[in-house]
Image (spheres, rainbow, N blue to C red):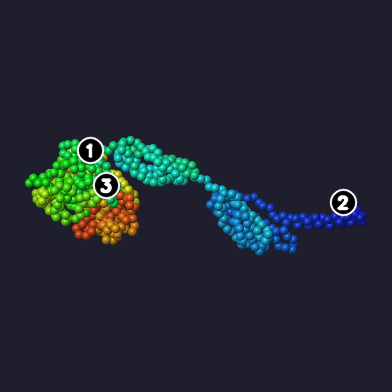
Amino acid sequence: MMYADRPPDAGAGLQLRRASAWLQCAALAACALLVSCGGGGGGGGSSSTSPVPTVSATNSATTPVIVSIGANPTALTVGESATLTWSSSNASSCQAGDAWSGAVALSGSQLVTPAAAGTFTYTLSCNGVSGSTTIVATNAATPMPTVSLSLAPANVATGQSSTLTWSTTNASACSASGAWGGAQATSGSIAVSQAAAGTYTYSLACSGAGGSASGSVTLGTSDPAGNVALVFVDSGPAGASNVINVPFVSVTLCRPGTQICQTIDHVMVDTGSYGLRIIAPGVLDPALALPALTGANGIAVGECAQFFSGFMWGSVRRADVKIAGETAPSLALQQVSDSGAAFSRIPSGCSNTGANLGSVAALGANGILGVGLFNQDCGPACATQAVAGTYYECNASSCSGSAMPLADQVSNPVAAFATNNNGVALSMPAGPAGGATTLTGALIFGIDTQSNNRVGSATVYAANSSGNFTTTYKGVSLTSSFLDSGSNALFFSDTSIPRCFGSPGFYCPASTLSLSAINTSANGAASAAVVFSIENLESLDRSVRAAAVGGSLGRGTRSRAFDWGMPFFFGRTVFVAIDGARTSHGTGPYWAY
């Protein structure tokens, strides 16, 4: 302290000089203390920290070491990464410590990913001077499960199947209740059906780490109309194997005028042929004893039915044929592979036409229900004279060709119904890419006779006297084309498509083909494009029973046709108007879709 108003004496001057020296010393000490403390830290943000320098203790003769390290972000979820950024000045080496380790460069950046929840310190030491930063990692919130279900279609006839599909997220276990039950996978698809009319709820409850969730969907079923028969595409009857794209229906046969009846399932629906044919061995109950048809000479009548893929030989008999609520009384039908002595020998005019389809194993069905464009399987051509390889009169020693009146020919049962007898509509759901294990549709009797068989906006394609129209494929007119649910593929000739190795009659393209053709009615009044797909048959799962597959018709007269087989019917309602029958959209024969 100095007093200016008092003159100093000699002693006082000495004291002042000592005080000044002490003040200088104190100033130097304070300066040294300030250098050794370094700078203070500033406020930090929520996502990152700026590198904070650390300065070494030194004196005026030594350059200080400065270390700085920071992280971005400083708060994250386990599994996420942050970037460490560091630098140093006047250092010769740096070492990582705590949550990281090893020698590191004097400056740089590095991604770090905390493996668990917690607070992690990252320390950097350079020439004995250290700095650090911290990162806080937390566990992500566990999401709640979700459950989704759907039915396609949501309303069906009793006995008709619907596809139940479900999916979940964040679920590890599921349990079904309501119209189904038991443990279920966290996703899947199955066919469901109900035998009685009503409303059925399918519920699914699932749980996971985040909790539990549930969902449900409702199926409505109603009794089908009397003119509707359910159609199933499935694995076929006992004795059949590897069937694909075969539509099946059930048919009841009764001894005419009696209640002695048998219902036969898995009878193929065929819009490309005419008349009912039932395989006898292993299918037809001998006790049914249907009466045999005899010819003009009182001898039993036999028939050879010829198809692209082979023939069926057997007797002609009569039965009351019942399908859904419709009845064709005393109808002439073919009892295939009849074991009677008169039919034990197949005439050469029949056997030389191809493979014998007279067994369940060969046909893949218990019989054929021909509901195509015509009333009889031969028609007027056979009524007045014998047509080779068609109708015969047979005894135990031989068979001879015979004419056959129209009334005695194997006949389309639809034309013999009391009502709903002018044709049929085959309605099928679409199948998914890669195929389906089962499909359920409907065979509806009559055209424009009920509210459920209206042609509506469907396009009518008139057929010629052979039941054909024209398909133009890749610029080639195929004038003998037809719609045939009895063919299990789209059959046409195209040498550019690879054949299957194990099934050379089918196409096996490297990938699914998208193709198109133009269908034109026989009278030229209607014409429209058809877009279709061909999948690789041998790439399908072995459980698939319905798929968009194709095959070759080969050469010769068949190459002038396009056989629109069962895959064409998937996702469509196709009308088949019988020759000479009147409908609101004209007189048959015609197709409409």
Q: Does residue 100 appear anywhere in the picture? A: yes
Q: State the CA–CA distance, disc 2 to disc 3.
A: 128 Å
Q: Residue furthest left?
A: 297
Q: Residue furthest top?
A: 198
Badge 3 amino acid: Ala
Residue named by callout 3: 238
Residue named by callout 1: 325
**Residue 360 location (% of width, % of height):** 23, 49
- Residue at position x 92%, y 56% from top? 10
Q: Mark 2, mark 1: which one is toward the viewer?
A: 1
Element under label 1?
loop
Element under label 3?
loop
Residue named by callout 2: 3
**Residue 169 location (% of width, % of height):** 45, 46
Q: State the CA–CA distance, disc 2 to disc 1.
A: 133 Å
Q: Residues within 10 Å of mark 2 (few under 14, many from 20)?
A: few
Of labels 2 and 3, earlier in sequence is 2
- On screen, residue 262 above or below 112: above
Badge 2 amino acid: Tyr
Q: Is residue 59 left or right of residue 426?
A: right
Q: Mark 2, mark 3: which one is toward the viewer?
A: 3
**Res 504 → quadrant:** bottom left
- Residue at position x 23%, y 57% from top? 553
Q: State the CA–CA distance, disc 1 to disc 3.
A: 26 Å
**Residue 120 location (% of width, % of height):** 60, 52
- On screen, residue 203 above or below 118: above
**Residue 589 location (% of width, % of height):** 19, 47
Badge 1 amino acid: Gly
Marks 1 and 3 in Cβ contact (< 8 Å): no
Which disc is residue 412 wearing?
Answer: none
Q: Residues within 10 Å of mark 1 (few under 14, many from 20)?
A: few
